[in-house]
């Protein structure tokens, strides 16, 4: 049975169509985020990206089967925080939330039923159900595919090349959104803005983060923070791990007075030294928690580690946790959360997550709840800061569709370095951010290479909760590690601007090469990525002294030396241990601040170094505001215009237009550096 009405245009270049009778609870309905209509209107309209009549949806036996055409020979990106491959074409992906994404099934911390065709279109299936999506990996009888002989023909393939996406979910229908291009980046921007994002983090959150060992007391944490200052390693955020609770696994959400006798004093003293505090928690409520009693009637049928699994789709349940967090955490000055373990794995042990047949008071079942739990927790906790006119940026281990407005970065217990870089790329297709954190290393070399990537990821963190590692753990590479952390801080003005663009026009601040206007041969690269508008990060991994980097057309320059590399193909980069290959597009302007111990607060005067690369004029708009409130949403921000003109005899001259003061930073003096 062919079901549902025709495609409706919902914004320029965005269409929706309802197939069958969708469930009312979906990922979009869980978040209820308003699309950014105005920003969407600024992206030029685009034609419907495939034959609209070719799409179909069939509902049979409580299942919906959706079918969409794909162009031959185009890669298919997206489907969430994928660690194992960039191009999903030819694969069947089982999009279930799972903390064990080690097998190539598609399961991951943040599966998203949203894919992006390399030809510049994207499709979102709006559901809270697990979606099994066959990306040109199943073939119908009516499709003509080659059938080579396996015995004699090396072209024989296990999966003959199909040209359709077929998606299946256990629901009597689904609403589908199609996003036009013409470029991959435009399709992704439309998706992000339609989700209501991106977001602007507080400026301090773009500095370096350190998470202390789980059993540390307040005094030990403060001593560790002081050690960063004493040794001259920059740090902005101190993260506490489970031991700050009176009970954890499941959680009490109350401070252990034994380890933290005076929480407000502790947070205040750290603030005086330029640190903010981030708290670890997970969603499962300990019988020892004060909120256990009130939450009990509002929780699901099954426990996790003996803790309640509250139904936070219910406003009453949200209110109970909000009030407790407000009283115990925000009133003490806590600035953010790490939302752990909302992504339990059934593969290793059933007790890490309620089962799919669990029931919840709202009427949702365990499958739906599991798929959206991370999304709901992010929204709930972000709202706490919004109410106080504060921004936050935190960590989360499960996410899903529509996450672009949620101020969180994903992390994982996995630790394969190449997979980390691939995840940084893949996150950018799906409205997600990935924190490629460091925890430890088996050699000084590996430590440096990992710290370099962490420093150039959306959230730069050392998670020493179990390892007790410090940046200076390997003394022989201390200088190289300090350099990476300092580079992070120097880049804060540039990164903050990249996030401002994410918030305004949906362009991800960290993104795969395929999101370049013209990626050329680099389109399928999964071991290099773009940071902000003009920096290309090509990490070296332990054991390497050189690597191949694929450059989009145009000239590129080494960030530190200004050495020229011709684009439009492959180049070999050799780099000593202390240097991370960071390349800059010709004509780019990169604003840097000094490697301060922590990021500056509103009103502070900061020197600005402005670099310009190569013999082409450049323009750049540097974003600035107070760095922590929501006043920017009401116009309290400025764009500082930076431009480089080049005279006929090749002399470069920099120009700055500061714009009106809006209570942000005072950039003074401004020093120009011309490279390349
Ligand atoms: C893990 C988490 C780690 C750390 C640990 C604390 O699940 O991924 O980063 O927070 O819990 O017990």
Image (cartoon, rainbow, N blue to C red):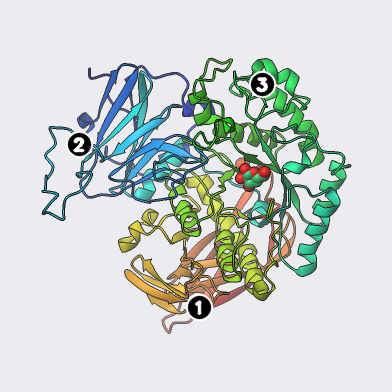
Q: Residues within 10 Å of mark 1 (few under 14, many from 20)?
A: some
Q: Which residue is mark 2?
A: 139
Q: On the image, which quarter does residue 242 sit in?
A: top right
Can residue 307 be seen at all in this image of the molecule? yes
43 is higher (above) or lower (below) than 544: above
Q: Earlier in the sequence, mark 3 or mark 2?
A: 2
Quadrant of the rendered structure where residue 284 is?
A: top right
Q: Can you tell me whether the CB of the residue at mark 2 lies under 8 Å from the nearest atom of ligand 1?
A: no
Task: Determine if residue 394 is in view.
Answer: no
Q: Is mark 3 within 8 Å of ligand 1?
A: no
Mark in the foreground, 3 or 1: 3
SS at mark 2 in the image: loop
The residue to which callout 3 is attached is: 317
State the image coordinates of residue 244 (x, y, percent, origin top left): 78, 42
Q: Residue at x 22, y 50 (%)?
A: 73
Q: Which residue is situated farthest in the front direction here?
A: 151
Can you give x and y, in whole percent of width and height, for residue 9 in the image?
33, 30
- For the point 83% across and 48% down, the residue is 217
**Mark 3: few, some, or many residues within 10 Å (few <14, many ≥20)?**
some
Sequence-earlier tag: 3 or 1? 3
Q: Secondary structure at mark 3?
A: helix
Q: Look at the picture and state if 447 lies above or below 566.
A: above
Sequence order check: which comes first, mark 2 or mark 1? Answer: 2
């Amino acid at each position: 049975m062919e079901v549902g009405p025709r495609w409706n245009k919902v914004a320029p270049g965005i269409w929706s169509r309802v197939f069958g009778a969708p469930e009312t609870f979906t990922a979009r309905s869980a978040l209820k985020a308003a699309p950014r209509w105005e920003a969407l209107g600024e992206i030029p309209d685009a034609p419907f990206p495939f034959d609209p009549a070719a799409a179909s949806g069939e509902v049979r036996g409580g299942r919906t089967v959706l079918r969409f055409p794909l162009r031959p020979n185009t890669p298919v990106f997206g489907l969430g925080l994928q660690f194992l491959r960039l191009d999903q074409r030819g694969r069947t992906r089982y999009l279930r939330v799972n903390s064990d994404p080690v097998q190539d099934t598609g399961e991951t911390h943040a599966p998203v039923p949203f894919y992006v065709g390399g030809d510049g279109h994207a499709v979102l299936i709006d559901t809270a159900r697990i979606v099994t999506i066959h990306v040109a990996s199943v073939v119908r009888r009516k499709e003509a595919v080659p059938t080579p002989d396996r015995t004699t023909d090396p072209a024989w393939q296990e999966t003959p090349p199909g040209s359709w996406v077929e998606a299946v979910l256990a629901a009597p229908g689904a609403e589908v959104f199609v996003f036009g291009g013409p470029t991959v980046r435009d399709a992704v921007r439309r998706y992000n803005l339609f989700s209501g994002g991106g977001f602007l983090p507080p400026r301090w959150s773009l500095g370096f983060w350190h998470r202390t060992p789980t059993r540390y007391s307040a005094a030990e944490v403060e001593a560790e923070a002081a050690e960063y200052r004493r040794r001259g390693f920059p740090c902005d955020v101190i993260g506490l791990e489970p031991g700050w609770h009176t009970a954890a696994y499941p959680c009490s959400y109350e401070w252990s007075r034994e380890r933290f006798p005076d929480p407000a004093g502790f947070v205040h003293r750290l603030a005086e030294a330029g640190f903010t505090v981030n708290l670890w928690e997970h969603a499962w409520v300990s019988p020892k928690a004060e909120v256990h009693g009130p939450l009990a009637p509002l929780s699901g049928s099954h426990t996790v580690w003996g803790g309640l699994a509250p139904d936070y789709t219910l406003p009453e349940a949200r209110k109970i946790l909000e009030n407790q967090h407000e009283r115990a955490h925000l009133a003490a000055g806590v600035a953010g959360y790490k939302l752990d373990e909302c992504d339990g794995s059934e593969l290793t042990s059933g007790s890490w997550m309620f089962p799919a047949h669990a029931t919840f008071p709202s009427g949702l079942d365990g499958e739906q709840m599991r798929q959206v739990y991370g999304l709901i927790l992010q929204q709930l906790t972000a709202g706490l800061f919004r109410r106080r006119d504060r921004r936050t940026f935190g960590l989360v281990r499960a996410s899903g569709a529509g996450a672009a407005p949620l101020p969180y970065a994903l992390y994982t217990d996995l630790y394969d370095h190449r997979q980390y870089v691939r995840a940084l790329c893949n996150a950018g297709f799906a409205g997600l951010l990935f924190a490629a954190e460091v925890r430890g290393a088996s050699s000084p070399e590996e430590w440096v290479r990992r710290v370099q990537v962490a420093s150039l990821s959306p959230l730069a963190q050392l998670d020493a909760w179990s390892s007790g590692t410090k940046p200076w753990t390997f003394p022989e590479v201390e200088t190289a590690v300090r350099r990476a952390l300092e580079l992070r801080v120097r880049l804060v003005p540039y990164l903050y601007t990249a996030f401002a663009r994410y918030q305004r026009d949906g362009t991800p601040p960290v993104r795969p090469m395929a999101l370049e206007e013209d990626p050329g041969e680099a389109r399928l690269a999964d071991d290099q990525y773009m940071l902000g508008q003009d920096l290309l990060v090509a990490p070296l991994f332990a054991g390497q002294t050189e690597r191949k980097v694929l450059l989009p057309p145009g000239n590129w320059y080494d960030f530190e030396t200004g050495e020229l590399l011709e684009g439009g193909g492959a180049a070999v980069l050799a780099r000593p241990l202390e240097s991370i290959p960071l390349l800059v597009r010709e004509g780019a302007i990169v604003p840097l601040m000094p490697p301060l111990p922590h990021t500056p607060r509103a009103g502070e005067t900061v020197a600005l170094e402005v670099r310009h690369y190569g013999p082409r004029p450049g323009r750049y708009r540097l974003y600035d505001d107070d760095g922590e409130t929501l006043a920017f949403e009401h116009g309290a921000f400025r764009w500082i215009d930076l431009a480089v003109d080049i005279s006929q005899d090749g002399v470069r001259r920099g120009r700055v237009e500061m714009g009106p003061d809006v209570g942000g930073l005072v950039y003074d003096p401004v020093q120009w550096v011309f490279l390349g």
